[in-house]
Image (cartoon, coloured by chain):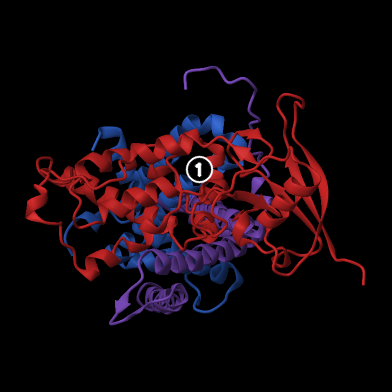
Amino acid sequence: MSKEKPFPEYRRKLGPGWWLANSHFTQYMIREWTSFFVAVFSLIYIYELSLFASGARADALNLLKNPGVIAFNVLALLFTLYHAFTWFYLIGKVQPIKMGKTTSKPWQALLVNIVLLLIVSFAVIEILVLR
Amino acid sequence: MSQDIATIRVTRYRPEKDGKPYFQDYKVPYRKDMVVLDALNYIKANLDGTLTYRWSCRMGVCGSCGANVDGVPKLTCASFLHEFKGRTIKVEPLTHFPVIKDLVVNMDDFMHKLVEIKPWIIREKESPPEEGEYRQSAEELERYDQFSSCINCMLCYSACPVYGLNEKFLGPAATALAYRYIEDSRDQGKAVRFPIVHEIEGVWECTLVGECSVVCPKGVDPMLAIQKTKILGATNALKSLVMPRGGGK
Amino acid sequence: MPKVARLHAILWGVFSVGGFIAAFLLPVLIYIVGIAYPLGLWPISGQDPTTSILNHHHLGTLFLFVTVAGSLYHGIYRFQSTLTELGLARAKRALEALGYLIVIVGILAVAYYLLMLNPGVLSLP
């Protein structure tokens, strides 16, 4: 075993474009990029809060009305929902629930959690915004 | 009637002659009942005796004939020619592993990882054979059953970009096998195995691509094993924070 | 568990909790603050949603803190690992350090601003 290898082995390296090699990888990369929108929206909102806290409420509200910011927020909402749906699906894969002899399928977890997401969202609007 | 012909485009790498791998095309008769391994055997027997690849059982049990077929890691013995589009099929060595010759890759890294996770039942104290076997219920068996089906074919490593980017990553099959013993009611080796799987280059590198579970020819779900192992690690870490003594080993 | 591995385990656990927060709570915040308010869509009528939420002292402040802090952590943790997968593997340690710096400063900032906006929030309801 300690002998030197007589011929060189050919080593391959994964380039930065590896995620284009198959559609699963591409979907995976889109899923991971949802984090960019989640993070950037959070940072924008922290900045909003800083404007509110320093009394510059009008500036904060004007920033929200900037077309570029609105466009980003629409994208951020779409990507965040994509994160939510993939997350729900993966919950179903990782923590299937056993009911008697049948085991729950990932798409069932997806559906149940989408209903839960709707309930939570309406509750937030009802309790924190409308009241 | 003219004969139906398939073109098998195989990676050739002959380190004694070529600096780099290249593709070589072989024409083989195309039959509905032919698998990719049959085509490779046809080439070796009739066209080019220098083509080198691994195989043994021809029935999806030994795990030696893995290759990337049309870009996807597969057992060549279990992939029919008619499953692929067109009449040209590309056969390459499993990705991420160093290539020794043609389709033969170096498996040392995987073999080391396999041994590292101690794939056997660990007991705090072995009981003498006269006392009989360690008994287990059907439910207890079910908890780890699927993870014991691994045939070490390494397709999951070939499918894993995280392993491709970081060779130190413990990876799918080794973690699935570790989890197989972690979940085995007869095993008492958690204290030995947890530090290995919960090492930084262990499960935490995984970003849930999920392709390992897609390509596994035996229905093992390494992605699930890795996630479960992460959850065990996180709960143990939390326990040991809350109760520094005695909590989570 | 060795200390470094324990830290990794806990950081992953928090990331995971953050994933739930970003999935269940963030979409509605993005919608009301970033889309419904500037475009004047349902359920907004007049007052901006941030002020409405902050009017509900404890619950509103808690909602904003959990949603923003959890999402920020989740997003940054995941995005720095995505960048390493896109060819920045060599900068892994630096990206991690930068990521955690952003997270810590960000979470402290959210807490500070929310306290400034609702100074009474630490007293019991």
* Front residue of this view, candidates B87 and A59: B87
Residue B205 makes an appearance in the image = yes
- Badge 1 amino acid: Ser
Which residue is at the far front?
A: B45
Q: Is residue C81 above or below residue C25?
A: above
Q: Is residue C81 left or right of residue C120?
A: right
Q: Which quadrant, please, contains the N terminus of chain B? A: bottom right
Chain that the image shows in purple: A
Q: Is residue B42 above or below residue A123?
A: above
Residue A55 makes an appearance in the image = no
Which residue appears at 23% of the width and 48% of the height? B121
Within-10-Å neighbours for mark 1: few <14, some 14–19, many 20+: some
Q: Is residue B59 left or right of residue B115?
A: right
Residue B244 in the image: state x and y as whole percent. 13, 40
Residue B39 in the image: state x and y as whole percent. 72, 55
Residue B219 in the image: state x and y as whole percent. 46, 63
* Front residue of this view, candidates A80 and A55: A80
Q: Is residue B167 above or below residue C60?
A: above
Q: Quadrant of residue C35?
A: bottom right
Colour chain C appears in: blue
* Front residue of this view, candidates B221 and B29: B29
Residue C22 in the image: state x and y as whole percent. 43, 60
Which residue appears at 35% of the width and 36% of the height? B116
Residue receiving disc 1: C81
Which residue appears at 38% of the width and 73% of the height? A124
Q: Quadrant of residue B147?
A: bottom left
Question: Label 1's element?
Answer: helix
Colour chain B appears in: red
* Front residue of this view, candidates B219 and B7: B7
Which residue appears at 49% of the width and 59% of the height? B213
